[in-house]
Image (cartoon, rainbow, N blue to C red):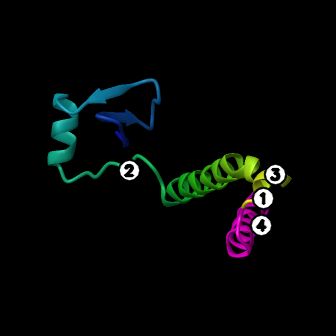
Amino acid sequence: MKLKICGNGFKDLDNPNIWYSNENSDVIQWLSEGNVPEPEFTEAELAQRELNNSISEAKQYLASTDYKMTMDYYATLTLAESSELTLKRVEAREFIRLSV
């Protein structure tokens, strides 16, 4: 038996159609014998999830500041505010471009 943590239970890696609960006697026996299940997510999967979250945040920032780039709104900003806004938008676009 080879198990992988899956939510509140375990998935059998030898037969992915089989899922065990934490209370399953076979699982309890398997664990008591010193066996260790594989983690739910690999390091690569966790890193990809983190990257996807960061890309999503950058896209949300760009979408939430689009209206600020109109001439009417942009003209109401101070030089420092407009420079900061422009810089942050450039950084967000660059981050997305380099991450995809």
| Closer to the camera in the image, 81 or 2 | 81
Going from N to C along the chain, the mark reached first, 4 or 3, is 3
- Kindly state the secondary structure of the residue where label 1 is placed: helix
Kindly report the distance in space between the C-alpha atoms of the residues bearing marks 2 and 1.
52 Å
> How many numbered discs?
4
| Closer to the camera in the image, 86 or 13 | 86
Kindly identify the residue that appears in the image at 76 percent across and 67 percent down. 86
Q: Amino acid at mark 2?
A: Glu
Q: Residues within 10 Å of mark 2 (few under 14, many from 20)?
A: some
Kindly report the distance in space between the C-alpha atoms of the residues bearing marks 2 and 4.
41 Å
Instruction: Tell me where the magenta segment starts and ends, as one range.
Output: 77-100
Kindly identify the residue that appears in the image at 60 percent across and 52 percent down. 57
Asked whether disc 2 touches disc 4, contact meaning CB atoms under 8 Å apart, the reply is no
Query: Percent from the top left, x then y, of residue 46?
Result: 50, 55
Q: In this image, 26 relative to 2: left or right?
A: left
Kindly identify the residue that appears in the image at 54 percent across and 60 percent down. 47
Q: Which residue is mark 2?
A: 38
Going from N to C along the chain, the mark reached first, 2 or 4, is 2
Q: Which residue is mark 1?
A: 74
| Closer to the camera in the image, 94 or 85 | 85
Kindly identify the residue that appears in the image at 75 percent across and 49 percent down. 66
